[in-house]
Amino acid sequence: MVDKSADKSVFRFKRFELANEKSAMKIGTDGVLLGAWADVSNARTAWDVGCGTGLITLMLAQRTDNMDIIGIEIDSDAAEESSANVRASEWSRRVRVVYDDVLKCYNELPVPDLIVSNPPFFKNALKAHGLARNSARHDDTLSYADLIRVASESLSSDGCLCMVSPVDRREDIEWACCLHKLNIQHVTEVVTAPGKAAKRLLWQVGREDRLPVHDVLCIRDSMGRFTEEYRALTGDFYLDF
């Protein structure tokens, strides 16, 4: 679905390319799903927390005409790589990358209407070798509770936080939302094929108290083909759709 050039570290989408050599967290389905699923309808300013290569940052830019987007990245190599990816894109004038810890800098940034994040989500698990890889995959540096707290203290009155999580972090997220007075507005269960248990959840939480939407997105059908709903969601980005 994503075309790799002769340089195996470069990924091509329909309207942008991404170098993915320095960032510890590699491009994958989670990020593409979140970047395509997040609600951009009322957002004027957005943050992509833990932007990595800049994948979601540039997806948001492609989906909007005038939204200002700030990618925030704590790892210096990833921040350098995402900055280069942004500069090479057609949206460089309204997208920038900040090399910083969001827990330290969020009060200094413009008020967001939308925060997106594909955060480190492994907890109490065997850690991969390498400090950067650990930070990208484990929640030592940015837990869901931290992210939700930042959102509760930063979002505009009608703003929302959109993020992806494993299913087994549902209770942690629900508790953090309750603690920080954010309402769960939309949850999509992502399943790989019919009859399979969901492994990922897409979340939208925000200040507005509204009837929450719960739905299911299936990536492949019983024949192993990508479903029409998945194609419709990601078709503006993947080269083969």
Image: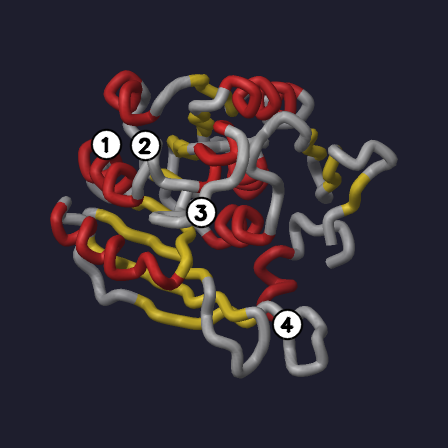
| Disc 2 element | loop
Cβ–Cβ below 8 Å for labels 4 and 2? no
Question: Dot 3 corresponds to which residue?
Answer: 126
Mark 2: amino acid: Pro
First in sequence: mark 1 or mark 3? 3
Question: Dot 2 corresponds to which residue?
Answer: 112
128 or 185, which is in the foreground?
A: 128
Question: Dot 4 corresponds to which residue?
Answer: 220
Alpha carbon separation for disc pair 1 and 4: 37 Å
Question: Dot 1 corresponds to which residue?
Answer: 154
First in sequence: mark 2 or mark 3? 2
Foreground mark, 1 or 4, reads 4
178 or 139, which is in the foreground?
A: 139
206 or 103, which is in the foreground?
A: 103
| Disc 4 element | loop
Residue 85 vertical placement versus 238 (above, below): above
Residue 226 vertical placement versus 110 (above, below): below
Q: Position of residue 224 (x, y in %)?
A: 70, 75
Mark 1 neighbour density, 10 Å: few (under 14) some (14–19) many (20 or more):
some
Q: Is residue 61 visible?
A: no
Cβ–Cβ below 8 Å for labels 1 and 2? yes
Mark 4: amino acid: Arg
Mark 3 neighbour density, 10 Å: few (under 14) some (14–19) many (20 or more):
few
